[in-house]
Amino acid sequence: MSADVLALPFDQYQRYRLVADLLRELRGDGPQLRVLDIGGRTAVLREFLPDARIDLVDVEPSSSAGLVLGDGSRLPFQDASFDAVCAFDTLEHIPVPLREAFVSEARRVSRGWVVLAGPYAHPRVEQAEELLQKFLERKLGERHRYLDEHRHHGLPARAVVEAQLERGGARVLSIPHGNLDRWLVLQCLSMYMDYDPALRPIARDFQRFYNAELYASDHAEPVYRHVIVAALAGRSLPRVEELLAKPVAPEGALRATFDMLGELVHFDRERNWWHAVRGESERTIQSYRRELERWQGLHASVEETLARVRQELTEARAYSEHLRGAYQSSEEGRVYHAARGEQLQAQIEALKARIRELELRGARE
């Protein structure tokens, strides 16, 4: 098993670890298992069972090697092609009319075991999912797609699935895991931490802590998930008591979880305060920006008026200079014409005197 699987979200680790341990225990010293993972486009099971040959089939594509696109209710494989056929939290996403066909197809292509892990219908399980969805909506402002599908299709009835497998000649065992109250609290914590980038490193440490310290004992009733194991053709059922610890948390493990919960509550309160302060600051800044924009608009208007006045003043000054020049020219003309008039008047007086002189001379003569 890869060491990286300890960093997986605890809810994902629960289902894959338990099924991988079951298959490993069922194989014993036998040959390599060939396993089909229905809905396994992420190929996570390969990380838990590196010593098995694992085929993948899913209706959605992915980059996982060897993925076959196919419908779980019409599998594109021959009868008895696999030692074990598994589905992880998949049946609840199948429309109700197709669920019987889904289980029948898993039974048809298996020659050894059918393993169906996931949540099954129970009032407390449905209530826990509803509370988780409300937490995500109210705290994080979003809805979880898969929880919506659970609610839309309805969780499968475990007794119905078990009865269908038994009618096909299988011996059936249902294995509980994931204490329901703990599952709800830890899911809220896990999704809350994953939502905030600042908390994601802490979230990874939290997942490693649960997976290493709490997983093995986390099966006290009531539980969130059951793993239905159907043994076919005389195959044996697993000895679960050898795979899990007693359903009592190790001493001090829950205390550490509660301490972290208290720190996260404190962090959330401080963050809410910071967001409130920042929001008020943002509103104040926006108010200042609007006021500044208003004053900038007034300033631009005043600048435009001043520019217009400056232009008008320049034009007035130019016109004034023109008038001053015209006046100067007219004054010089007046002086010139006055002098010229005096000259002409003197000439006229001289002519008059000459005329009188001539008249007198004529009279004398």
Image: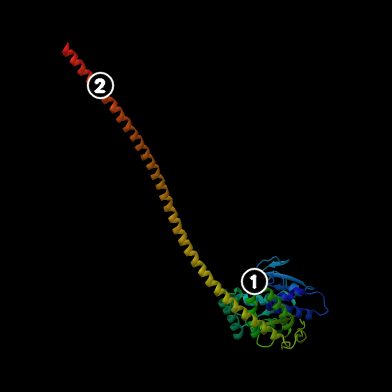
Depicted 197 relative to depicted 245: above or below: above
Q: Residue furthest top?
A: 365
Q: Secondary structure at mark 2?
A: helix
Residue 113 visible at all: no
At numbered mark 1, what does the secondary structure look like: helix, strand or loop?
A: helix
Q: Say whether marks 2 and 1 touch (CB < 8 Å).
A: no
Rendered location of residue 3, percent (x, y) = 77, 74
Which residue is label 1 attached to?
197
Q: Give the camera-side residue of 107 and 314.
A: 314
The residue sitting at 52% across, 72% down in the picture is 280
Q: Residue furthest front?
A: 364
Mark 2: amino acid: Ala
Residue placed under numbered mark 2 in the picture: 350
Give the residue type that dot 1 points to: Pro
Q: Residue furthest left?
A: 363
Q: Residue furthest right?
A: 29
Q: Quadrant of residue 55?
A: bottom right
Note whether 342 is above or below 111 in the view shown. above
